[in-house]
Amino acid sequence: MANHKSALKRIRSNETKRLRNRYQHKTTRNAIKKLREADKKDAVTLYPSVASMIDKLAKKNIIHDNKASNLKSKLAKHVAAL
């Protein structure tokens, strides 16, 4: 157990950040699944918002930059192939 007031605060803030990151990551994954299942018209309109969500995750180090690039690339190829 933590002995310092600052350590207790760090535990609380880490938990808050963990839950926020988990929510954002799950929301993005659901948006990616929705885009993959969408038809051409919907996928074209969804792609910019999903790419933005992926960029935000990478910026906050929730996912790695390369993973973000790979996801966006695969989604762009998928949308173009529809």
Image (tube, helix red, strand yellow):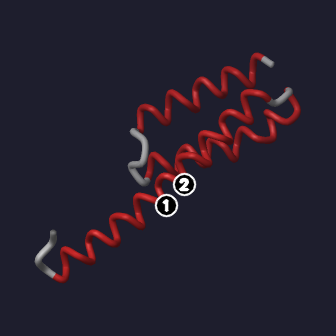
Please name the amino acid that badge 1 sits on. Answer: Arg
Please name the amino acid that badge 2 sits on. Answer: Tyr
Who is closer to the viewer here, 43 or 7?
7
Where residue 40 appears, x then y in whole percent? 85, 27
Judged from this view, the residue extending furthest toward the bottom is: 5
- Tell me whether the residue at label 2 lies in contact with that at label 1, contact meaning CB atoms closer than 8 angstroms: yes
What SS does tag 2 mark?
Answer: helix
Count the marks.
Answer: 2
Relative vertical location of residue 42 with respect to residue 53 in this rendering, above or below: above
The residues tagged by marks 2 and 1 sit, at their Cα atoms, a distance apart of 5 Å
The residue identified by callout 1 is 20
- Side of 12 where 5 appears, left or right: left
At x 55%, y 53%, the residue is: 24
The residue identified by callout 2 is 23
Q: Quadrant of the C terminus?
A: top right
Judged from this view, the residue extending furthest toward the top is: 81
What's the mark number on residue 76?
none
At x 49%, y 49%, the residue is: 57
Judge the density around disc 2: few (<14), some (14-19), many (≥20) Cα neighbours within 10 Å: few
Judged from this view, the residue extending furthest toward the right is: 41
At x 76%, y 16%, the residue is: 81
- Side of 76 where 1 appears, left or right: left
Relative vertical location of residue 37 with respect to residue 11 in this rendering, above or below: above
Where residue 73 appears, x then y in whole percent? 58, 26
Who is closer to the viewer here, 4 or 39?
4
Judged from this view, the residue extending furthest toward the left is: 3
Where residue 55 appears, x then y in whole percent? 53, 46
Q: Quadrant of the N terminus?
A: bottom left
Judge the density around disc 1: few (<14), some (14-19), many (≥20) Cα neighbours within 10 Å: few
The part of the image, by quadrant, that contains residue 60 is bottom left
At x 39%, y 49%, the residue is: 61
The part of the image, by quadrant, that contains residue 46 is top right
